[in-house]
Image (spheres, grey):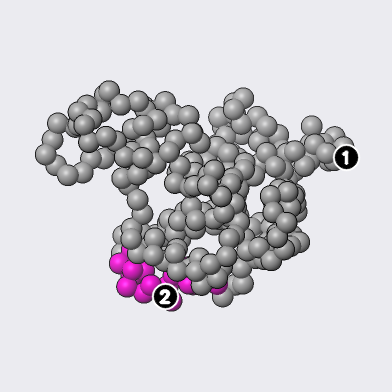
Amino acid sequence: MFGTSERCAIYAQPFHSLKMQYGQQHAVPLSSSTKSASRVEDNNLFSAIIEAVRRPSCIVNAASRFVAQVFHGNPYAAIHWRYDKKDWYRYHCVVHYGPKFRNACEILPSITARDIASGVENMLREETSDHFGLFVYIASPPSVENFTKQIYDSLEFLVPLEEKNYLKNFFSMNFQSCWKDLTNFMDVDEIVSLTEMEIMVRSKWFFYSFGSTWSENIRPLRKVGSGFSEADVLSLVRNALLKQPNRVARIF
């Protein structure tokens, strides 16, 4: 397809050249009869890249064992909260503010941890009658670690992780050789982030962050429609805020 006998190809700057409809891809390989990459639609090409480029096997195994031991094999919810003020908000809402992120930018400064916890729990109440005791995992950038802990503290019926089970500690204690090999060329936070992606893929309920490529790389690998479900966490919070006249008046 690329006119070379080499085994690997690096696709630089795909966001500048691919016209994608995020959230609509499915991770499927290209047909072996495909002869030219130029004849493949962008969505199909992107899905094939997702299928081919997976995380290291020891990270996949670490995530699988984490889910089995910490969640005891039970279905669990996973939240990706991407919206830190120094990076995402500054870039999308200050430097490059546009209509695509208008709704997000309007409400982000006023959102509390309790708003997020309530939005997620309200949806789970509608999705399942057996919601009490459900585990939840929250993935977020290190810069919003304190805010993430506030979300955990604000949950009413979901079960947060105990500190001893935090992923970084679990990985370093149970996968020493893999941890050592990866830290030779990767930052610790990157290792944790990759493992969290695998945890999100396995979750029964995934609350993703709109506008985040991290979330969008997870969604095609999930079994949505086969007992798995997902929702835009920001839309859940926005809809909840619109039902609170006093809050809406302050925000808008």
Answer with mark 1 or mark 2, whichever residue precedes in sequence.
Answer: 2
Instruction: Determine which quarter of the picture holds residue 45.
Output: top left
Image coordinates for residue 161, horizontal then vertical, percent: 61, 68
**What is the three-letter code of the residue carrying label 1?**
Asn
The stretch of residues the image draws in magenta is 165-182
Quadrant including the N terminus: top left
- The residue depicted at 80 percent of the width and 36 percent of the height is 242
| Main SS class of the magenta portion in the image | helix
* Nearer to us: label 1 or label 2: 2
At label 1, counting other C-alpha atoms closer than 10 Å, the crowd grade (few under 14, some 14-19, many 20 or more) is few
- Kindly identify which residue carries mark 1: 246
Identify whether 153 is placed above or below 44. Answer: below
- The residue depicted at 39 percent of the width and 41 percent of the height is 27
Instruction: Determine which quarter of the picture holds residue 171.
Output: bottom left
- Kindly identify which residue carries mark 2: 174
Which residue reaches farthest left?
Answer: 5
Image coordinates for residue 122, horizontal then vertical, percent: 74, 50
Residue 112 at least partly seen: no
- The residue depicted at 27 percent of the width and 34 percent of the height is 31
